[in-house]
Amino acid sequence: MKKFRFLILLLAVIGIGLLHFITPGHMVFYHGTYRRLSYFPIALGAIWFGVRGGLGVAAITSVAFIPHLLLFIGKDPETYLSELTEIVLYLAAGGFIGIIAGRESKLREKYKLLSEKLKKSYTRLQEETELLIEVEEQLRVSQKLADLGQLSASLAHEIKNPLGSIKGTAEILLDDFPKDHPKREFVEILLKETSRLDSSVNEVLHPFRGRKIAGQDADVEPLAQVITRVKTLLESELRKKSVGFSIKGIELVNDFLVAGERISQIFINIILNAVEAVEHSGKIELMLRKDLEGVYIQIGDNGPGVPPRDQEKIFGAFFTKRDEGTGLGLSISRKIAESYGGCISLINSGSGACFEVFLPFELSNGYKEQIGSEPDQSDQQGQPD
């Protein structure tokens, strides 16, 4: 780029010198115009290349001006000195403009460095601000958790007493329906959900109190049975919005044992979120698959999906987009899954939202060992003391 600029200036100076040389000396107007044109390449040389560039182009211009100057040798001394003074002015202009341009260049470089420092300072300030906002958000969540802990005792008392009454009433109703009665299933569901809600009180009030698995749960049942019960339980919610709900691969988990009450809470939370997200006559699909490590349950819908900016937040406590939501459903579900050695993640399904629940074989095997090691009560009853 510099060479190209210098070449332009050189050609301009040579061109002006040739114009001086081929123009007769008595054509004073043209020579005066050429002399003034010579200041343009000098000024550009000084601006582009500093003092050295200005003086260099001025010197070349002076050399190109010499043939014109020779035309005045032996003539009027005043005219000759006037033409000779032009060379001095060329050099003075090149040097003076070069000094000014050099100072401007230094100031420009100084301001550039200052701008870069300000940019770095702004970036650092922005990062510190984001960190401060994140810390404040964590403090806000911690405060909410602290407030929730203070309410836990009174809430537990107020909720568990009515639950006990509901459970007792359901047990009385259960006696009125024989095993082959079509409505007995719904009473059994009522009993199971009452028990689940009773245990869920502690999970909601203490969402980060986990427990590690088999041997500590009384409601052990096949995962297929849990999913079927969840579907039956949510039929009214699905029917309100005419949401289609399909299950694929449920036959794969007929012998996969889980803690029914707690694991069903995971599916209820995710499916209810999906029902809320999809439009009227939307679709929800639950698909199961196995591999060497465990069972994967994918629950996908054709709703709007989760925005990228929220994908890292949805499992955090109190994060919700609904006015009536608590923001605890997914947080509690993840803690339940993790307490049994599993996990929940949001996966990219192409459209809508899709959550994947993983439950390890360790969970089912632990319950199978527990059941297999229990003593036969009938045999014990027949033994003498």
Image (spheres, rainbow, N blue to C red):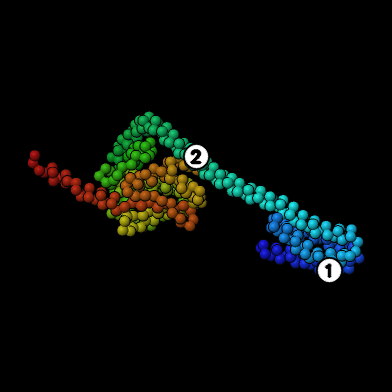
Work out whether residue 375 can be spotted.
Answer: yes
* Left or right: where 254 falls relative to 349: left
Quadrant in which residue 204 is drawn: top left
Q: Is residue 250 above or below residue 118?
A: below
- The residue depicted at 42 percent of the width and 47 percent of the height is 270
Q: Nearer the viewer, residue 293 or 26?
A: 26
Relative to 265, residue 16 above or below? below
- The Cα–Cα distance between marks 2 and 1, rounded to whole angstroms, is 75 Å
Q: Is residue 271 left or right of residue 27?
A: left
Residue plotted at (45% across, 46% down) = 314
Say which of marks 2 and 1 sits in front.
1
Q: Which residue is mark 2?
A: 132
Q: Which residue is mark 1?
A: 21
Check if mark 2's residue and mark 1's residue have beta carbons within 8 Å: no
Q: Position of residue 211 (x, y in %)?
A: 31, 42
- What residue lies at 77% left-to-right and 64% top-to-bottom? 63
Please state the horizontal and vertical placement of residue 103, each as a whole percent of the image: 68, 50
Q: Earlier in the sequence, mark 2 or mark 1?
A: 1
Residue appearing at x 62%, y 49% in the figure: 112
In this rendering, position of residue 269 left or right of residue 60: left
The picture quadrant where one finds residue 77 is bottom right
Asked if one can make out residue 169 in the rendered structure from this viewpoint, the answer is: no
Which of the image's four quarters has the N terminus?
A: bottom right
Query: In this orientation, which residue lies closer to the viewer: 5 or 140?
Result: 5
- The quadrant of the picture occupied by the C terminus is top left
Front residue of 77/273: it is: 77
Q: Which mark is residue 77?
A: none
Check disc 1 and report its element: helix, strand or loop: helix
**What is the three-letter code of the residue carrying label 2?**
Leu
Q: Secondary structure at mark 2?
A: helix
CA neighbours of label 1 inside 10 A, class few (<14), some (14 to 19), many (20+): some
